[in-house]
Amino acid sequence: MHSLPGHPKCGVPHGHTYLVEAQVEGEPMGGIVVDFDALKRALREVLAPFDHADLNRLVSYPSCEAIAMEIHRRLKARMEGRKVAVRVWEGEGKWAEYEQ
């Protein structure tokens, strides 16, 4: 659940069923860029605080863009210098992506 203070439509509390995608780039180590089990575990841990939460408590202005940036920040810290991209889908055809 979140609200976007000051937004004419989204200023009231409402929810979405978000979908999060993560991509990791880097030099292969031991034949792989990242172990999928490790990535899945890290992503689950990063996303756990967002599940069924008031997103306004996690992100100051929880737009799809800001949510993508915050998830990216948390996941990047676990990916040991690799390039990470996070895409957050807010609904069909509506998404924001952040990479670094």
Image (spheres, helix red, strand yellow):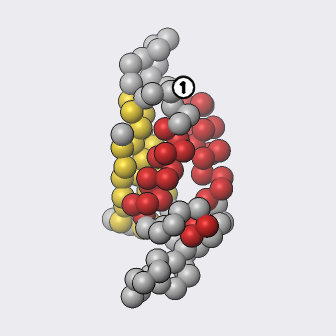
Is any atom of residue 93 visible in this view? yes
Number of other residues with Cα within 10 Å of mark 1, as a class: few under 14, some 14 to 19, many 20 or more: few
Mark 1 element type: loop
What residue lies at 42% left-to-right and 64% top-to-bottom?
Answer: 64
Judge from the rendering whether residue 83 lies leftward or rightward of residue 39; answer left or right: left
Q: Looking at the picture, how far across and down is residue 12, in whole percent?
A: 52, 85
Residue closer to the observer: 76 or 19: 76
Q: Could you say which quadrant of the image residue 13 lies in?
A: bottom right
What residue lies at 60% left-to-right and 31% top-to-bottom?
Answer: 37
Judge from the rendering whether residue 36 lies leftward or rightward of residue 27; answer left or right: right
Q: Could you say which quadrant of the image residue 15 lies in?
A: bottom right
Q: Could you say which quadrant of the image residue 54 lies in?
A: bottom right
Residue that carries the numbered disc 1 in the rendered image? 35
Residue closer to the observer: 83 or 40: 83
Give the residue type that dot 1 points to. Asp
Q: Which quarter of the image is occupied by the C terminus?
A: top left
Q: Which quarter of the image is occupied by the N terminus?
A: bottom right
What residue lies at 41% left-to-right and 38% top-to-bottom?
Answer: 84
User: Vertically, is 1 above or below 20?
Assistant: below
Q: Looking at the picture, how far across and down is residue 59, in whole percent?
A: 53, 63
Is any atom of residue 17 visible in this view? no
User: Vertically, is 97 above or below 62?
Assistant: above
Q: Looking at the picture, how far across and down is residue 91, in whole percent?
A: 42, 67
